[in-house]
Image (cartoon, rainbow, N blue to C red):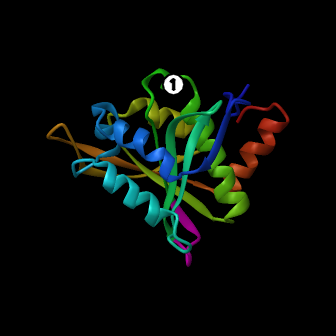
Amino acid sequence: MAPRTRRSDLRLCPIMPAHAPAMFRWMKDPAVRLGVGIRTEASLERTLEWIAQARLPGSGVWGFAILVGERHVGNVVLDRFDGHLSTARLSIYIGEPDERGRGVGRCAVREALAHAFDSLKLFKVWLTVHDENVAARRTYLSLGFQEEGRLRGEFLLEGRRVDAIYMGILAEEFVTREQLAARGEAR
């Protein structure tokens, strides 16, 4: 059986200014900062500015708050939209430590992919993940992403250089996986 990628208690909603305090708090958490690769000091003002920019029509950014019940636990973002190629980058973080490792990220990525391919009609969604984030890489592979390349030493993790892994999934691959999952077949 395919891993569970849906939860009735999880939903995505557009990131709003009300989400900024939690986002700012999470950006101060070393586990989030290191995984995301934040290069500047986080501030509530910068967080609010990012939200305002992301919400502008035509920004090419689709930012979603991940809600479990009504609790905001993280964010998933589609950005770096390329209209000519019909591609976008996906990034995600689970800010609340007690929600990590419980399938929230897997479900949120699946929902974001459904939006990317069904609503935005993208051809491909890609991402980067550092080589030492084994849990995230395993999750992405289980959702159908394929490793497309490796940039040696491209990511700084606590002052050490680690490889950045490029991964991608095509719309047709996602649709096929969804059809198989609906029939209860693993792939």
Q: Secondary structure at mark 1?
A: helix
Residue visible at 60% across and 40% down? 108
Q: Position of residue 148 (x, y in %)?
A: 45, 53
On the image, the x and y values in percent for residue 93 come to 45, 39
**Residue 156 is one of the magenta-drawn residues:** no
Tag 1: amino acid: Glu
At x 27% / y 47%, what residue is drawn? Answer: 42
Is residue 156 found left or right of 178 in the rendered image? left
Dividing the picture into quarters, in which one does residue 3 lie?
Answer: top right
> x%, y% of residue 92?
47, 44
The quarter of the picture where the C terminus appears is top right
Q: Which residue is mark 1?
A: 99
- Who is closer to the viewer here, 4 or 149? 4
- Please report the bounds of the magenta region as a residue range: 82-88
Assess disc 1: are there few (<14), some (14-19) or many (≥20) residues with their C-alpha within 10 Å of its C-alpha: some
What residue appears at the point 28 percent right and 37 percent down from the top-left corner? Answer: 28
Quadrant assignment, res 29: top left
Residue at the bottom extreme, as displayed: 84
* The quarter of the displayed image where residue 116 is located: bottom right
Residue 85's place in the image compared with 89, above or below, is below
